Image: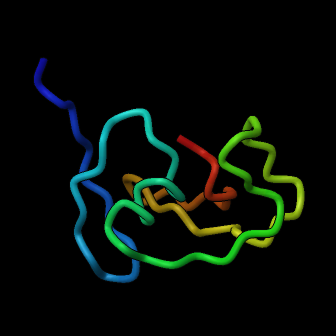
Amino acid sequence: MERKTVNVTIDGRSLDAEEGNTILLAAREFGMHIPTLCYMDHLSPYGGCRLCVVEISNNGETLYRHLLYP
């Protein structure tokens, strides 16, 4: 089965991340360290601490989301 990817840019780096992954997992896949307090591999994503809030731009619209956003 072919892996579906989406192109994202993080800190000026263009990455082809697996579709459906969170922003945090996409960044980690490419060796980018992003500090988190509430993320744990064995728990469901929560995002309650808001330490990992990022700016997302899409077609001129800017949103602010935590890195657990797919």
The residue lying toward the viewer, choosing from 57 and 46, is 46
The total number of labels drawn is 0
Residue at the spot x=52%, y=40% of the render? 70
Colouring mode (rainbow / by chain / secondary structure / one colour): rainbow
Q: Where does the image place residue 7, in percent across and percent down from the top left? A: 24, 53
Q: Where does the image place residue 32, in percent across and percent down from the top left? A: 42, 76
Residue at the spot x=42%, y=65% of the render? 27
Q: Residue furthest right?
A: 48
Q: Residue furthest left?
A: 2
Q: Where does the image place residue 25, in percent across and percent down from the top left? A: 48, 54
Residue at the spot x=80%, y=44% of the render? 46
Q: Is residue 70 above or below residue 35?
A: above
The residue lying toward the viewer, choosing from 10 and 41, is 41
Looking at the image, residue 28 sits to the left or right of residue 41; the answer is: left
Q: Residue furthest front?
A: 42
Could you say which quadrant of the image residue 44 lies in? top right
Screen quadrant of the N terminus? top left
Residue at the spot x=18%, y=31% of the render? 3
Looking at the image, residue 17 sits to the left or right of residue 47; the answer is: left
The residue lying toward the viewer, choosing from 52 and 55, is 52
Q: Where does the image place residue 54, in percent across and percent down from the top left? A: 61, 68
Looking at the image, residue 35 sits to the left or right of residue 56; the answer is: right
Q: Residue furthest top?
A: 1
Could you say which quadrant of the image residue 6 lies in? top left
Q: Is residue 49 above or below residue 41?
A: below
Could you say which quadrant of the image residue 20 lies in? top left
